[in-house]
Image: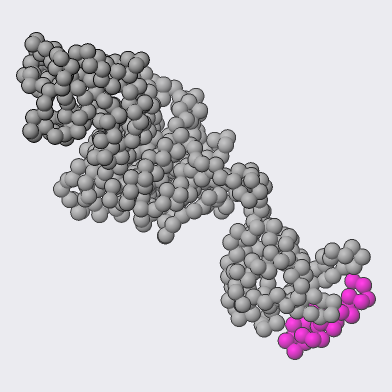
């Protein structure tokens, strides 16, 4: 110290001597030297940690410059919107013995004294006083926090090289689980829920595995529980498979209120932490995306999907957009004030949905998921309580499963299991029924091949050598139920195809009188409608003495009227026409007109099948279809082994 500085320090000591701070030079006073903006001078700052005089002091002149001090605990380095970012975490202390936590104060705040003043004012209100120049306070804070520990922020889940899995409390590697605190990016959680794993002894984890085998697997219909558990472990397998099959899929447990969907969803969510509640679809789609972004490589369960939660068709359509963006890994790019792209906030978790209603109406959106019907069942309170309690420890097995993956699997090996599953499913005779539409079929088969891949790997971990027979028995049960569930989903998707909905509704509305068809007579005149035939005219036809029907349908009229009555029926006339042409249901003339008994009618010629009864013709029984019905039972009984 130079002579002037010594004099200033002595003067400051004298002004504080009544507080008995300076019984010796290094007792309760700390000071360090830092440079000011003026390179020709040096300033020294003193930190008083005691009593009413607590705060930072400018030694030169003995001036107190704050009534608080800040202790930084973490310096976290990360990236946001493609740019490097640093932030601090710590505490701010006051003379009355109270403190406040500092959460994510950016490093740039400490580079801008006026910005720092605003930050402290917003955090502490009038409690914090900056008595001197903010520039001096910032320099003092930096001076006394030079050795703050540095951390690298990570997203929850696997790193890019797939050799470590990060949580807030653990770093999981193939040979070790390290209990260390890690700053987690996008750590947007809600309520008292905690994303992360409990880490216990292997013996305790083995007890949990045994409970899952003995109690959880038999809880529900195998079609429900086995596929749901396979999906629960899939987030830990998907990163090894995403180069081969990048599109994610959702799993929906669909059924009436009280069927146990939400309860099971909470059990599956608890494999990834401690969750007292589930996120709900009553939140905005933005909130769903932002929260789901934090669940990378984990289950993200969203509860209570039902029609009554959406006030308008537009709100329901947002659900479809959310599911499409989730599956495809896309979202709307947003720009910040300097026109650089912000980080995409899309659901990075694997979406588990409990639903009373399907809500979505587009077949392509339905095909992006696996939908399982859950039926009501008799309540078993003892078993329910038992699983509820045990679910609090389900996450104890996940660190061991992650180690199992890192030790035994790589991208090549997981891809081989996926390819095997894909081949067995796609070659199954039930899937190669010529009546099954090829629309969306590749995506559907990929979803189910991924489910089977997850079950194969998970069951190898869950069952030990002593229970190998049980594992093989469950594998057979899983495969059988997988195929029946796949057929259920194919049938559901087909029933939601716009052309299928249009055709089914067209004949129904003609039969019930909502729509009507006008007959064209030989002299090009139209037959006089009956007194009860007041439906909207959607087409014209001719009928000869041999009951040969020539039918013209006006697509635009029929489609416009259907949209007034069918909820969420969204397709354009051009799209519908293209689908009906591809299915060889219609024929279109270049003039867009068809001649019926020399009368030119605007519309398309219907060349597909239609109910003969709407023209007063008795439907003939098809002997081939009758034979199929008779043989169906025996064929199903012979099909014991599905793979």
Q: Is residue 270 left or right of residue 171?
A: left
Picture coordinates of residue 497 (x, y %)? Answer: 30, 29
Q: Main secondary structure of the magenta part?
A: helix
For residue 192, above or below residue 530: below
Picture coordinates of residue 254 (x, y %)? Answer: 26, 42
Q: Quarter of the image holding residue 511?
A: top left
Please check the rendered image and state whether residue 2 is part of the magenta-colored stretch, yes or no: yes
Residue 608 in view here: no
Quadrant for the C terminus in the image: top left
Q: Is residue 449 left or right of residue 345?
A: left
Quadrant for the N terminus in the image: bottom right
Residue extending furthest top?
546
Residue extending furthest bottom?
18
Please check the rendered image and state whether residue 78 is part of the magenta-colored stretch, yes or no: no
Q: Is residue 625 left or right of residue 469?
A: left
Residue at x-position 25% and y-position 35%: 562
Q: Quarter of the image holding residue 373?
A: top left
Number of numbered markers? 0
Residue at x-position 64% and y-position 53%: 76
Residue at x-position 33% and y-position 35%: 570
Residue 292 in view here: yes
Residue at x-position 49% and y-position 37%: 330
Relative depth, front residue between 357 and 372? 357
Relative depth, front residue between 474 and 621? 621
Relative depth, front residue between 147 and 625? 625
Tell me the colour scheme of the image. Answer: one colour
For residue 606, above or below residue 57: above
Picture coordinates of residue 326 (x, y %)? Answer: 44, 39
Boundaries of the magenta span = 1-26
Picture coordinates of residue 71 (x, y %)? Answer: 66, 67
Q: Quarter of the image holding residue 442?
A: top left
């Amino acid at each position: 110290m130079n002579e002037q500085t010594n004099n200033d320090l002595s003067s400051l000591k004298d002004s504080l001597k009544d507080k008995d701070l300076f019984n010796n030079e290094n007792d309760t006073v700390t000071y360090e030297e830092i440079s000011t903006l003026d390179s020709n001078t040096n300033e020294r700052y003193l930190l008083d940690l005691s009593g009413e005089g607590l705060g930072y002091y400018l030694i030169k002149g003995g001036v107190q410059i704050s009534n608080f001090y800040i202790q930084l605990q973490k310096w976290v380095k990360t990236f946001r919107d493609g740019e490097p970012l640093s932030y601090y975490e710590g505490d701010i202390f006051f003379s009355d013995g109270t403190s406040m936590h500092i959460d994510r104060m950016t490093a740039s705040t400490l580079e801008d004294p006026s910005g720092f003043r605003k930050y402290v004012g917003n955090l502490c209100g009038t409690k914090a006083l900056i008595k001197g120049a903010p520039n001096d306070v910032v320099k003092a804070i930096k001076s006394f926090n030079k050795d703050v520990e540095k951390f690298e922020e990570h997203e929850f889940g696997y790193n890019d090289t797939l050799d470590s899995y990060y949580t807030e409390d653990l770093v999981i590697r193939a040979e070790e689980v390290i209990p260390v605190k890690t700053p987690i990016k996008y750590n947007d959680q809600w309520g008292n829920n905690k994303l992360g794993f409990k880490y216990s002894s292997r013996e305790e984890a083995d007890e949990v595995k045994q409970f899952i085998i003995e109690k959880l697997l038999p809880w529900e219909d195998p079609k429900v529980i086995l596929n749901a558990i396979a999906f629960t472990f899939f987030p830990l397998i998907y990163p090894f498979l995403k180069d081969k099959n990048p599109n994610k899929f959702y799993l929906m447990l669909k059924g009436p209120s009280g069927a146990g969907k939400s309860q099971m969803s909470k059990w599956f969510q608890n494999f990834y932490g401690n969750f007292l509640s589930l996120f709900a679809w009553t939140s905005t789609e933005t909130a769903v995306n932002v929260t789901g972004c934090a669940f990378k490589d984990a289950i993200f369960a969203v509860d209570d999907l039902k029609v009554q939660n959406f006030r308008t068709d537009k709100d329901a359509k947002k659900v479809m957009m959310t599911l499409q963006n989730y599956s495809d890994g896309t979202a709307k790019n947003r720009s910040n004030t300097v026109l650089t792209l912000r980080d995409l906030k899309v659901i990075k978790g694997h979406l588990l949905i409990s639903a009373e209603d399907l809500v979505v109406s587009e077949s392509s959106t339905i095909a992006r998921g696996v939908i399982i019907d859950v039926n009501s069942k008799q309540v078993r309170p003892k078993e329910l309580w038992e699983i509820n309690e045990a679910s609090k420890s389900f996450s104890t097995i996940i660190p061991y499963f992650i180690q199992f993956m890192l030790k035994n699997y790589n991208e090549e090996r997981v891809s081989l299991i996926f390819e095997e599953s894909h081949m067995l499913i796609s070659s199954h005779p039930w899937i190669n029924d010529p009546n099954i539409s090829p629309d969306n079929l590749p995506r559907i088969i990929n979803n189910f091949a991924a489910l089977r891949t997850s079950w194969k790997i998970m069951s190898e971990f869950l069952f030990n050598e002593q229970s190998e027979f049980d594992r093989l028995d469950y594998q057979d049960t899983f495969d059988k139920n997988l195929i029946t569930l796949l057929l259920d989903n194919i049938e559901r998707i087909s029933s939601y195809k716009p052309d299928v909905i249009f055709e089914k509704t067209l004949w129904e509305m003609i039969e019930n009188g909502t729509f009507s068809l006008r007959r064209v007579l030989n002299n090009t005149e139209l037959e006089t409608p009956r007194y009860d035939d007041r439906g909207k005219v959607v087409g014209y036809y001719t009928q000869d003495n041999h009951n040969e029907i020539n039918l013209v349908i006006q697509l635009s009229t029929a489609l416009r009227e259907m949209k007034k009555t069918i909820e969420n029926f969204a397709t354009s006339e051009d799209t519908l026409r293209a689908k009906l042409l591809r299915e060889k249901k219609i024929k279109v003339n270049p003039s867009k007109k068809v001649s019926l008994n020399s009368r030119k009618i605007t519309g398309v010629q219907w060349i597909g099948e239609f109910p003969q009864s709407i023209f007063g013709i008795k439907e003939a029984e098809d002997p081939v279809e009758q034979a199929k019905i008779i043989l169906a039972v025996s064929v199903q009984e012979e099909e014991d082994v599905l793979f």
